[in-house]
Image (cartoon, grey):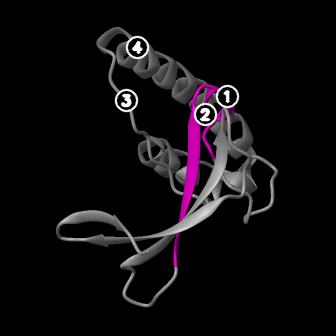
Amino acid sequence: MTSIYRGIVLRSDMKFKASTSGLYSGKLDLQLSTLRSIAVDWKCPAIVTSWPISPMSEAMGSKPEQDFIGGRAFGFLPKTIMKLEATDMKGVIRRVILKKHRSKPPGDSCLIEIGEAGIKDTK
């Protein structure tokens, strides 16, 4: 969802980056709300991915290392937010870190392997 708007914000003039990212964060909020409504109506999960570190954070006045979620709705509408980190050079093993969950504390993590057959726990 955020990749389309990221390009627009990054190409905008430096003096307009903050207002441009604010405008598109609002559009992302609306899209996420609509997606959530559709998922609730159809009783199915909706998965939204975002790039975990983004130059857009700088445009919004944050540190470049700060996670970019994509607007206020991306922070409170999702039931679960997870971060994937590469742990090996091949990019097959990933650490999944829990950022938000309604009944679990943030910070829990596990290792998974992403392969041709799908995702499996590395235990």
Return the residue nearer the eye: 85 or 6: 85
SS class, disc 4: helix
The residue under label 4 is 40
Q: Nearer the viewer, mark 4 or mark 2?
A: 4
Residue plotted at (72% across, 50% down):
106
- Which range is magenta? 69-86
The residue under label 3 is 45
Where in the figure is residue 70, as x and y percent of width and height? Answer: 60, 40
Residue plotted at (61% across, 33% down):
74
Q: CA distance from mark 4 to mark 3?
A: 8 Å
Above or below, 16 relative to 119: above
Residue 81 painted magenta: yes
Labels 4 and 2 touching (C-beta < 8 A): no
Above or below, 18 relative to 32: below
Who comes first in sequence, dot 2 or dot 3?
A: 3
Q: Nearer the viewer, mark 1 or mark 3?
A: 3
Q: CA distance from mark 1 to mark 3?
A: 16 Å
Q: Nearer the viewer, mark 1 or mark 4?
A: 4
Q: Which mark is residue 62?
A: none
Q: Amino acid at mark 4?
A: Val
Residue plotted at (52% across, 56% down):
51
Q: CA distance from mark 1 to mark 4?
A: 16 Å
SS class, disc 3: loop
The residue under label 1 is 76
